[in-house]
Image (cartoon, grey):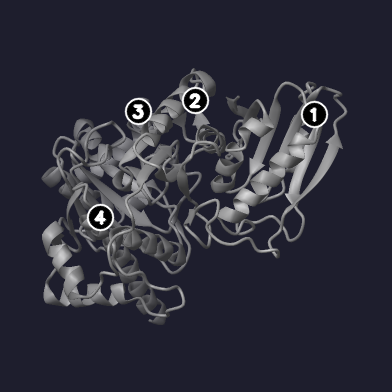
Amino acid sequence: MADAVLARQQGDDFQARMFWLNAALLLRGDGMVTKVAFETGPKAFDDVVIDYAADKGPLDHHGKRVLRLHKQCKWHVQPGDFGASDLLVPKFIGGEKHSFLNRARDAQVSFAPAGEGAMFELLTNWNLRADDLLWKLIRTQWNALDLDALFEGGPRSAMGKLRAEWADHLGIDECELRHLARTLMLHTRLQSGAQLRDQLNDRFASVGMRQISAAQTGYEYDDLIRKLHAQGRKEFDRESFRDLVRDENLLAGPPEPEKTTVGVRSFMHPIDNLSVRVPEMLDLVDDFDGRYLKEGNSWNSDLLPRVREFILNVALQGDHMRLVLDAHVSLAFAVGSILNVKAGKSIEIEQRTDGKRFWKRDDVPLDPAWPTIAVNRIEMENGGNELALAIGLTHDIVLMVTGYLRSRPDIGALLAVTLDKGSASGASVKSGSHAMMLAEAVAAAVRREKRGSILHVFIAAPNGFTFFLGQQQQVLGRTVVYEWDHDGPRGTGYSEGITVG
């Protein structure tokens, strides 16, 4: 009984925070979000509903404008997983008669009969089973279903049998199933409650709402949702939400000073869709297959010119910039090289680690207790003239890099950079000023070394650090940044990313 009560309470709080995360956008001046509601809409997809302006809504995975997003929030106290067959079982969504697919089909017929205009999203902290067909169907950059994969193969294929099982369950044909599948999204890589709380504080600060300190045990925004529910106040447009935050004393003051907010995205964040909150964004997701550059695309011929043109154009809009980079390490380095230390811009970069969410090169005073770098030069047996640089701030990569370099006869030495005290971790870089200090120290160490025509760089560090290191590119010289094979299937360890200089 206690576990059931805890699960319900945590689930309600999670749903409430999803409401506030999206409702705060009603205070923004861009007019993208026009209405946000909770527990109002089609059954099972009424937890949070967001309406977008017809000409400003985010684009879906087929490039069509989304006018409405329905969210179903399922929070579990205990870890678990699910697969394609669970979408047919009512118990999976806490029902008795109707399955997830039943509810999704009803909602799709009502709000997206042609499979466009609305999306229906399941948010859950359970994972997809890695050996399940559903896991193979998720386009991770969008959290949507890959229709090409789902409708590949005949009736006797694995996907054909899955299509038949779903269609028979719903009593529809494959054409109708395609319309339904096109509208479904599954988010399974959720942030922790503490991380979501930090994200909310950042969102509140951007629109002038009061933040809640992490030192406080309670969370008054959760309590307010329960009161609003009891009053039957579940739907808010821009005017009524502004009235609400004023009447409830939720305004902390004027929003933060206007900055040019710029985003570069090469993969989708599991819960934070940049297109909703970043007005100027370069979206490179379609150039990748998951984390990997699609065959036929080039980092240097295709991506780098687009990144350079985009960054230089938005840099003309003002001297105060805020960068949001949901992007590969070599893209973060490239953006830094474009906005180098001589650019004359005040730049903040969003960093998804514990502590400060936005880093600046001088955001806090330097602390002598912070770790700096230790440098070790390792001679490779290959005897080449080129120099490699391995930077391990979040984890140690020396063994992985040296293993890769055995296949590179052109590289004769490795400069291994680690922390001089403490161990590599996600919290090893404390702030923007710390990241800048480390980047400058790395650049100084490289400058003292003999190197060939190009520097080969391997990085395990926050993107904020990588951006600041990119700002030092003129000191480093011509540089190629390498990408790590995150998921392992390609078996190559590292591959060349962008070359700058």
Q: Earlier in the sequence, mark 2 or mark 3?
A: 3
Q: Find the distance from the CA under tag 2 to the CA under tag 4.
A: 32 Å
Q: Find the distance from the CA under tag 1 to the CA under tag 3.
A: 39 Å
Q: Are marks 1 and 2 in contact (CB under 8 Å)?
A: no
x and y, in percent, of residue 132 in the image = 46, 44
Q: The disc labelled 2 sits on which kind of residue? A: Leu
> Can residue 45 be seen in the rendering of this structure?
no
Residue bearing mark 3:
148
Q: Find the distance from the CA under tag 4 to the CA under tag 1.
A: 51 Å
**Residue 222, numbered label:** none
Q: Are marks 2 and 3 in contact (CB under 8 Å)?
A: no
Instruction: Tell me where residue 469 sits by quadrant.
Output: top right
Q: Are marks 4 and 3 in contact (CB under 8 Å)?
A: no
Q: Find the distance from the CA under tag 1 to the CA under tag 2.
A: 28 Å
Q: Residue at left 30%, top 65%? A: 15
**Residue 406, numbered label:** 1
Q: The disc labelled 4 sits on which kind of residue? A: Leu
x and y, in percent, of residue 94 in the image = 29, 64
Please give left or right for residue 333 compared with residue 477 in the image.
left
Residue bearing mark 4:
25
Q: Earlier in the sequence, mark 4 or mark 1?
A: 4
Position of 216 relative to 398 (above/below): below
Q: Earlier in the sequence, mark 1 or mark 3?
A: 3
Q: The disc labelled 3 sits on which kind of residue? A: Asp
Q: The disc labelled 1 sits on which kind of residue? A: Arg
**Residue 304, numbered label:** 2
The C terminus - image quarter: top right
Q: Residue at left 23%, top 40%? A: 180
Depth check, mark 1 against mark 2: the one in front is: 2
Could you tell me which secondary element the residue under label 2 belongs to? helix
